Amino acid sequence: MRTLMIATLTACCACVAQVHAQVAPPTNVKTADAPNDVGNQVIVTWETSPDDVDGGVTSYVVVRSKVDTDESTPIDEGAIGDVPYGVTTFIDENATAGTTYWYGVRATGSAGESAIAQAEESVTPTMEMINAGKIWFLIIMVTISGVVILYVYHAKRGGNISVRKIAGLEAVSEAVGRATEMGREVLFVPGILDINDIQTVAGITVLSNVAKTAAEYDARLEVPTARSLVMTTARETVQAAYLGAGRPDAYDENRIYYLTDEQFGYTAGVQGKMVRDKPAACFYMGAFYAESLILAETGNSIGAIQVAGTAMPSQLPFFVAACDYTLIGEEFFAASAYLSDDPEQLGSLKGQDVGKVIAAGLLVLGCLLATLGAMTGSSGIDAASSYIKDNILGKAGVMPAMVLHIGQEDDTE
């Protein structure tokens, strides 16, 4: 079988090799199934041709033949790729799991092509059930998940989980109370994206709290929306909030309405209402784009208390500059846990904080070790830094020995 395979691989290049015998072939060709893949990669390594000096070799061409298990005969697939001179590794990323292949490598140069150097053995790529390069990722995820479960269990048993105060949410009562005293309305803008955006969902969560406070203070609440589904969701949320506050009679669905899907048409409609009615409190909670500054500046010009929240980094500076309070990024998403006091949400929030501490600690430790290694030249510190970078944060696995050194051999016997 191997004789037949070799004959097939070399047939297409035999004549060329006879004419151009000046280029020596590479040596010690080896193949190996690539680890931690789905069975579609094979690693081919070799030693350079003796002519790989002074421009004698320009590239190495890798050829492949597969064994047809039904006919037990080689199927020549010819060249599958090439690499420049001096390179001794090629990764075939188009293999098929469970198929047996023979590989060969030939050198090409100004003098022509060498004979094909055959691999010592055939190779059959297989899919690994476990990706050893992501074991550390699994360990970290299991740790964080375990911490989340512990905190949720702790909260459900009545344990205290402290969450720092979020100034923007603490200001809801102040803003709604001011609107009640002045006899003016409260305006809530839930962003311009649809209900499938997580920022809109977070904004509706804050709306529930604002609506409940407005019901308790007997303040008028206006909610213009840019999406029909957001309008429907907002109506149900506000109605539930009024019912929970014991004021179902004060709920008016006509104050929660749809304007338009068009970005600046919606912005113009809201801006016009702000100028005409001069609400005493304005809430902007959701996803915003260029309209953020227009709305915030208009609210600032009419003297309203303004509270904004978004996860759009490019719009945060405008809200910070023009609003009294701003929920920045994660504060906005933590609002539901902060406002609801739900044990599951509080436990999840606390567990995520532990995950952030772990990630930040690894980054700080890695930077510190890299700096000390560069300053002291200590091999031990360099090894620890490399382990964090390559193993914990990389794909080299748990043990340093699991790092794959392509093209290197162990010279010990």
Image: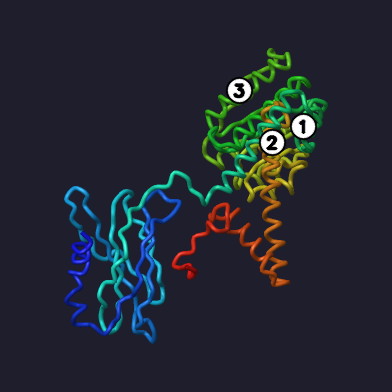
Is the C-beta separation of discs 2 and 1 under 8 Å? yes
Badge 1 amino acid = Ile
In this rendering, position of residue 80 left or right of residue 297 = left
User: Secondary structure beneath disc 2?
Assistant: helix
Frontmost of labels 3 and 1 is: 1
Nearer-N-terminus badge (2/3): 3
Q: Quadrant of the N terminus?
A: bottom left
Disc 3 is placed on an element classified as helix
Q: Which residue is mark 1?
A: 161
Q: Nearer the viewer, residue 281 or 375?
A: 375
Instruction: Say which of marks 2 and 3 sits in front.
Output: 2
Residue 177: name its quadrant: top right
Which residue is at 71% across, 40% downward?
331
As displayed, is residue 387 above or below residue 327? below
Which residue is disc 2 drawn over? 349
Indicate whether 37 appears above or below 249.
Answer: below
Mark sitting earlier along the chain (3/1): 1
Q: Position of residue 312 (x, y in %)?
A: 62, 46
Q: Are marks 2 and 3 in contact (CB under 8 Å)?
A: no
CA separation, marks 2 and 1?
Answer: 10 Å
For mark 3, does the 10 Å Cα neighbourhood hold few (<14), some (14 to 19), or many (20 or more) residues?
many
Q: Earlier in the sequence, mark 2 or mark 1?
A: 1
Residue 31, percent from left and from top: 36, 62
Instruction: Please give the residue where the numbered disc 3 appears in the rendered image.
Output: 235
